[in-house]
Image (tube, helix red, strand yellow):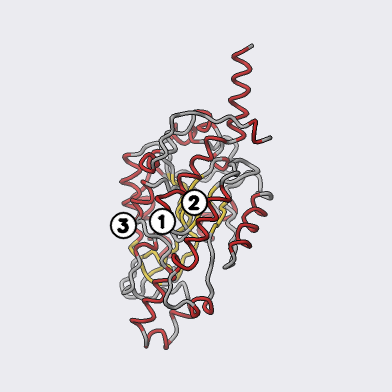
């Protein structure tokens, strides 16, 4: 469809980020009946890394760092450097929810000293239980918002630890958890609202097959660009956008990944100042002519979602107001009313 044929749906949508806490509820009515994998959904990369501190203990998700005697011998300096390049978000869980983030990229590990489960990314962050409680509190007062939790990596966890995490999910989120649905054709916001489901949990471990509320990794492809080049990143995103698998969710990772040599060359810098500010600037430009749908975007994640006063989640949400699918539905409705 030519861009000139797109019908802008005027809902007097306030572009201030404050309205993002209820953006799903405030979508055009036509969007409520679109499959969730055909909506543009803002997400965050390493979502809860804002809970890291320069004094946090080194986590097992980076074995070379975790097992390095040199790193442990230079603990204070090393932790500061790790923090500078591992912290990918400034907003905490509640702030991200209020800023419209609906997809959360979660990495979890068990601490050997207390046996509890924590968010990790190079360093240990906050406990998973407190994060889930924050999410429940938000959803309880925002009954038409739906979140997607993607447990991407699970470290140092045995069967008992998985059971502990799943128990937290069931105990805290309970009836909000949506069971796995293989056919997404009718998997819409309206369908979810009718049933009171607000949480979709993707669990990238074989244990998922034994629990009806866990969605398998195959249902949400999430390719990693693994580059430090903005040009290569945007080419990667464009390439995958054109070959999305039908009937699945899809995550576009707009993230740059520094390797150890790159970090050594920029020891006095950090992820945000050296890589993210410019990549997020270019992401905003890249999004200008994009649209959601089966041959368009679905979930888009980035680092530091607060960039430019939350311009990225705002832009992603606004894409839903010019969806070709929704616009076509409105055109057909208008023609019918004229006849």
Quadrant of residue 323 in the image?
A: top right
Q: Nearer the viewer, residue 154 or 242?
A: 242
Tell which circle, 2 or 1, labels the residue nearer the N-terminal end.
1
Label 3 to label 2, Cα distance in Å? 20 Å
Q: How crowded is the residue under tag 2: few (<14 C-alpha within 10 Å), some, or many (20+)?
A: many
Q: Are marks 1 and 3 in contact (CB under 8 Å)?
A: no
Quick one: SS at disc 1? helix
Residue 166's disc is: 1
At which x and y percent is residue 173?
A: 36, 47
Q: Nearer the viewer, residue 108 or 161?
A: 108
Q: Are marks 2 and 1 in contact (CB under 8 Å)?
A: yes
Q: How crowded is the residue under tag 1: few (<14 C-alpha within 10 Å), some, or many (20+)?
A: some
Mark 3 vs mark 2, foreground winner is: 3
At which x and y percent is residue 128?
A: 36, 60
Q: Which residue is mark 3?
A: 130
Q: Nearer the viewer, residue 250 or 183?
A: 250
Q: In what quadrant of the picture does the C terminus appear?
A: top right
Quick one: SS at disc 3? helix
Q: Is residue 330 above or below residue 92?
A: above
Label 2 to label 1, Cα distance in Å? 9 Å
């Amino acid at each position: 469809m030519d861009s000139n044929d797109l019908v802008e749906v005027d809902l007097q949508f306030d572009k201030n980020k404050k309205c993002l806490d209820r953006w799903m509820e405030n979508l055009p009515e036509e969007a409520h009946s679109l499959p969730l994998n055909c909506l543009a959904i803002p997400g965050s990369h390493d979502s809860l890394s804002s809970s890291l501190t320069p004094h946090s203990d080194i986590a097992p998700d980076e074995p070379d760092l975790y097992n390095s005697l040199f790193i442990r011998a230079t603990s204070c300096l090393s932790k500061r450097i790790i923090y500078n390049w591992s912290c990918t978000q400034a907003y905490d869980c509640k702030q991200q929810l209020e800023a419209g983030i609906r997809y959360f990229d979660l990495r979890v590990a068990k601490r050997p000293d207390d046996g509890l489960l924590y968010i990790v990314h190079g360093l240990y962050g906050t406990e998973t239980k407190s994060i889930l409680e924050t999410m429940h509190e938000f959803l309880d007062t925002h009954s038409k918002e739906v979140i997607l939790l993607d447990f991407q990596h699970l470290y140092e966890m045995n069967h008992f630890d998985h059971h502990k995490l799943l128990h937290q999910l069931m105990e805290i989120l309970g009836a909000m958890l949506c069971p796995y649905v293989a056919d997404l054709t009718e998997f819409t916001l309206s369908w979810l609202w009718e049933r009171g489901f607000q949480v979709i949990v993707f669990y990238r471990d074989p244990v998922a097959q034994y629990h009806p509320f866990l969605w398998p990794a195959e249902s949400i492809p999430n390719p990693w660009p693994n580059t430090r080049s903005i040009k290569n990143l945007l080419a990667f995103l464009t390439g995958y956008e054109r070959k999305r698998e039908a009937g699945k969710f899809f995550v576009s990772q707009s993230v740059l990944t520094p390797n150890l040599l790159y970090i050594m060359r920029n020891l006095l810098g950090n992820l945000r100042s050296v890589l993210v500010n410019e990549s997020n600037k270019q992401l905003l430009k890249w999004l200008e002519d994009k649209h959601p749908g089966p041959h368009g975007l679905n979930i888009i994640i980035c680092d530091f979602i607060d960039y430019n006063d939350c311009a990225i989640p705002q832009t992603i949400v606004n894409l839903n107001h010019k969806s070709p699918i929704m616009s076509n539905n409105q055109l057909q409705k208008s023609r019918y009313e004229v006849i």
